[in-house]
Image (cartoon, rainbow, N blue to C red):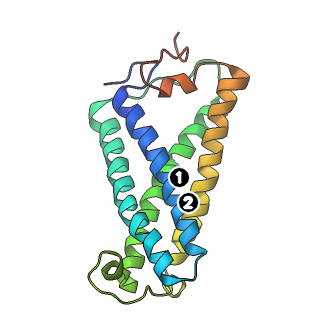
Amino acid sequence: MKSTPTQYGSVAVTIHWLSAVFILAMLGSGFRAASMTESTAKEAILIFHAPLGTIILVLTLLRLFWWWRVDQKPRPVDGGPAWQTFTAKAIHVLFYIAILGMVASGIGMLALSGAGGVLFGANAEPLPDFTEFLPRVPHGVGARLMLVLFALHASAALYHHFIKRDGLIRRMWFGSKGKGAGS
């Protein structure tokens, strides 16, 4: 369950991959909903989108708690330049900030627009125009930031796997024995 100096544990791996899948689903549904003008179709997507934000928040808080109180991350892969280690840490911190910011701005939009009642069945009014509410701006910026961070994160993982062949990507999978640090 817990990580070793060279391998992420099953809890960290599960949280990582669930988060990745849910974040991609969240981004896809959010961009799709933002491009729609027909209220009923947009509502159907947002009924999926809004609770997914709650799931991502819970996973993120669980991950932060896991690293803070229960587990320790594996050591960085040996032989990498300091700038890569710094950049990896910065991207992870920015992910957390962006996720928490997206949740806050999403809640802000629901609260200010009254759309929560529509999405959760409390009233049958049409959805409001979200562009009229200030949290829409950071929500849109955050979504684009998440895409950039995801692209950088995935590109770095693929670079390590296919170019450096240092076992980094195997460290974030179930039961794998990554070559990573110290091996």
Q: Which residue appears at 55% of the width and 76% of the height? A: 137
* Residue 135 in sight in this render: no
| Residue count near mark 2 (Cα–Cα under 10 Å), binned few <14, some 14–19, many ≥20 | some
Which of 105/46 is in front? 46
| Image-based side of 103 in relation to 80, left or right | left
Q: Could you tell me residue 94's position as x and y percent? A: 53, 51
Q: CA distance from mark 1 to mark 2?
A: 6 Å
Which of 157/94 is in front? 157
Asked if the residues shown at circle 1 and circle 2 are in contact, with their CB atoms under 8 angstroms apart, the answer is yes
For label 1, the residue is 24
| Image-based side of 59 in relation to 169, left or right | left
Q: Secondary structure at mark 1?
A: helix
Query: In the rendered structure, which amino acid carries the disc numbered 2?
Result: Gly
For residue 119, what is the image quadrant? bottom left
Q: Which residue appears at 62% of the width and 33% of the height? A: 157
Is 157 placed above or below 97 here? above
Q: Which residue appears at 48% of the width and 59% of the height? A: 26
Q: Secondary structure at mark 2?
A: helix
Q: Could you tell me residue 3's position as x and y percent? A: 37, 23
| Residue count near mark 1 (Cα–Cα under 10 Å), binned few <14, some 14–19, many ≥20 | some
Q: Seen from this angle, which residue lies furthest right?
A: 163
| Image-based side of 161 in relation to 59, left or right | right
Give the numbered dot on residue 28: 2
Q: Which residue appears at 46% of the width and 64% of the height? A: 102
Give the numbered dot on residue 115: none
Is 144 placed above or below 131 here? above
* Residue 78 in sight in this render: yes
Which of 12/44 is in front? 44
Q: How many numbered tags mark residues here?
A: 2
Q: Could you tell me residue 10's position as x and y percent? A: 36, 27
State the quadrant of the N terminus.
top left
